[in-house]
Amino acid sequence: MPLQSSFAKSALSLEQQLGQKLILDFRYYCEQVSSKQCRTPMTSLPSELANVITKHNIGGVILFSENTQSIEQTITLNTQLQTAASKSSSKLPLFISIDQEGGRVARLPRDVATSFTGNMSIGATYKKHGIEYATKTATVIAKELASLGVNVNYAPTVDVNMNPDNPVINVRSFGENPTLVGKLGAAQVAGFESNGVITSLKHFPGHGDTSVDSHTGLPQVNHSKEVIYEQDLAPFKHIIAKQNPGMIMTAHIQYPQLDSSTFVSVDGKTMIKPATMSRTIITDILRDELNYQGVVVTDALDMAGISHFFTPTQAVINTFAAGVDIALMPIEIRTPDDLNKLGELIKELVAAVKSKQLDEHEIAQSAKRITALKSKFRLSTNFDPITALINAKQIIGSTAHRAIEAELAVEAITQVKNTDSALPLKLKNAQRVHIIMPDTRKCMAMQQAIETISEQVFTYTCSSLQGFDPEQAGRQIKSADVVIAANATPNQSAVEIGGMDDLKDDPNFALSTAQQPQALESLLKMAKQSNKSTVFISLRAPYDIATYGEYAQAVLASYAYNIDIDEDERVSGPAFTALAKVLLGKEQANGVLPVTIKPQKAH
């Protein structure tokens, strides 16, 4: 692709520089203003949003699953976005960014693109395969993203998951060992960037030991300085030295041992600065000490870890003053009224530079880092949608890519326990299998995976942890030959469940999220008392094995449970297929736990 001539032109005006320092989201957009919250996905670029990109020389956009509904639609949208950028006075192409980590966090439709079983499953393969799957997954995801015109991926997550109660990272981490996390993260950076997609290591200086989700609050990490350097910062330090990633994303987390300076929040409270706004953390440590000279981007500024405490303008000024290059999602743009707010924000930022609240030289240096990164990756506003579509349809979700996805899923399966050779299952034709799953869809996925792999025919019953009739479940467990029970912690969000209403048929047995762990334990106890051959499967973070593993003869961990639904309404997913292969002895469980499971509690 030809380079824009404007790259050579470093003399951007102050307004152009500030526009480049913003990445906007257009997740939803309603052309009519109403009192209701706008929830209309933006799948095609309206002229007023195109004008905003052009007028303000906006640096980039972030896409969500609402914006990426099919290959053709996504390519058309990305073409419209780059066309708007080509009409700006700077002519600079956009960063078109996305969170396509793989596993839990994937914005492209799972039935279309290859989303893999995620980072902790890659961590589980490290002992046998080294960096092989880190490299392969990043290469596949990068090829699929680049074919759509996406040029920045907010990945890899190199947080070291040291906290079993971490609600937001858990299986998004490669594991608890900083050296392993650093090696696998570096391999992913190389895999993405050698295939034309800029990476953004996250979440600096580390989100691995938090029990608060920064989407909903402001977490604090109270590690000593030594622990921070040995654990949290170690993967970032290793990857900066080895791969020099294009971007690094900041965390909305307080680190009092790195910086205990304070700010006064919008409601008058004095609080410790989050890393995103700490000059000590961003400039002194990341830039000067770790010698990172690339682009620093904030995590989304609409997250409660920031938006509860600052006005949007204050938030952006504070992050820029700390030395951050790009403000991600600085204001919500949902209706035409919000477009004026963007104009106001840029005016206020210009005023902050004029009044010396922001340093003019630093803003210019920051804009230069951004344009240098766009130049290095040869980003262009010339995106031919016809060629792109032909290319993307051959690449995205290809047979070769799906084969790597299936391979990783199998290689990650970890056998934590196998008493009395309970595995592989010794099932005979017409025997009964009782499946206990977080929801009905996962029961179906497990059943269909077994049916596809086994030559024999079994009878299946299911208890969904969202609700079941205890008496009926008791009867089904008693008459079963094998019980396969599974759990997913931390709790799934509605999005992950897939919006299924499990209980349309019988609302009498609905279980709240809080009741589900006890329900699972009661069903497992029932199976144990009936001397049933029981397998427990940890479907997400394997820490739950400490609670439920004692009730089963065999215990497996899969680190993932995502499912696809095909045109025939068949439910499947790489993790379930892999589990079925191991359960039936068609494959070995070669994975190794990448985190420590605390000793099982005494009852």
Image: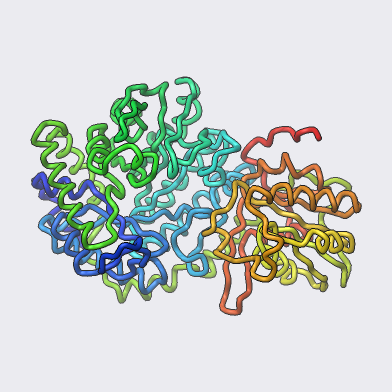
The residue closer to the viewer here, 349 or 194, is: 349
Q: Quadrant of the N terminus?
A: bottom left
Does residue 380 sit above or below 232 in this rendering?
below
Q: Could you say where residue 378 lies in the image, as x and y percent from the top left? A: 25, 55
Q: Could you say where residue 579 lies in the image, as x and y percent from the top left? A: 70, 58
The answer, for residue 323, to whether it is visible in the render is yes
Count of labels in the image: 0
Instruction: Please give left or right for residue 398 compared with residue 547 in the image.
Output: left
The residue closer to the viewer here, 2 or 38, is: 38
* Residue lying at 28% horizontally and 36% vertically, measured from the top left: 293
* Residue lying at 33% horizontally and 71% vertically, measured from the top left: 388
* Residue lying at 82% horizontally and 64% vertically, measured from the top left: 472
The answer, for residue 182, to whether it is visible in the render is no
* Residue lying at 27% horizontally and 39% vertically, measured from the top left: 315
Q: Quadrant location of residue 547?
A: top right
Q: Could you say where residue 469 lies in the image, as x and y percent from the top left? A: 77, 62
Q: Quadrant of the C terminus?
A: top right
Q: Quadrant location of residue 279?
A: top left
The residue closer to the viewer here, 51 or 76, is: 51
Q: Could you say where residue 17 lies in the image, as x and y percent from the top left? A: 15, 46
Q: Quadrant location of residue 408?
A: bottom right
Does residue 110 sit above or below 526 in this rendering?
below
Instruction: Please give left or right for residue 384 compared with residue 441 in the image.
Output: left
The residue closer to the viewer here, 312 or 42, is: 312
